[in-house]
Image (tube, helix red, strand yellow):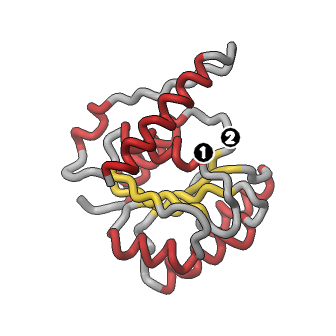
Amino acid sequence: MKTLISFLKRKLKKTEQHLSKQPGQAQSLTFDKSMDKELKRPIRVLVAKVGLDGHDRGAKVIAAALRDAGMEVIYTGLRQTPEMVVNAALQEDVDAIGISILSGAHMTVFPKVLQLMKEKEMDDVLLTGGGIIPGEDMKKLNAMGVGKLFAPGIPTSEIASYIKEWTKENRNF
């Protein structure tokens, strides 16, 4: 676990350096820790990469940002199946599942994960995510029951705030 945390810290530092070199592209990677005072325990989020999509830098940046926002983050790693993701989420008793997808398989992956969550009665767990997902597909997925989906370039603080607000409204602490 310490190795993963060290790895994520290095990746976050490189990302911060990269972002600071791009004029007009500044994004805040710091968070107000006081937002956690209302919660009795940390929010638990599972971050996953489903399928053959091998690009996980964004997922690691999100995992580090959510951790820095006071959440407990479980990162599944690459090449997970929807069944593996849902089983891990159930075992880890998470409040939210975040799927990073760049492969174009979002209209297959999200409905399958949602179906498996319903079968396991995980109706009080948020399914959210982001990546390369066209706006029309985001609307279709939202209508199916998937939470808010995030496109590249969204500030990580917005993602953390969304998960915190959803969890406060939908989970029992």
Frontmost residue, 16 versus 47:
16
Mark 2 residue type: Pro
Q: Is residue 69 above or below residue 46?
A: above
Q: Residues within 10 Å of mark 2 (few under 14, many from 20)?
A: few
Please identify, in this view, whether the residue under mark 2 or under mark 1 is nearer the observer. Answer: 1
- Whether label 2 touches label 1, CB < 8 Å: yes
Cα–Cα gap, marks 2 and 1: 9 Å
Q: Name the residue: 68% across, 18% down.
A: 22
Q: Which x, y percent locates residue 126?
A: 47, 62
In the figure, residue 142 lies in which quadrant? bottom right
Of the numbered discs 2 and 1, the one sitting upstream in the chain is 1
Q: Which x, y percent locates residue 65?
A: 45, 39
Q: Which x, y percent locates residue 34?
A: 27, 31
Q: Name the residue: 68% across, 13% down.
A: 23
Q: Which x, y percent locates residue 122?
A: 43, 75
Q: Is residue 6 above or below residue 33?
A: below
Q: Residue furthest front?
A: 3
Q: Residue furthest left?
A: 40
Residue identified by numbered label 1: 58
SS type, badge 2? loop
Frontmost residue, 59 versus 107:
59
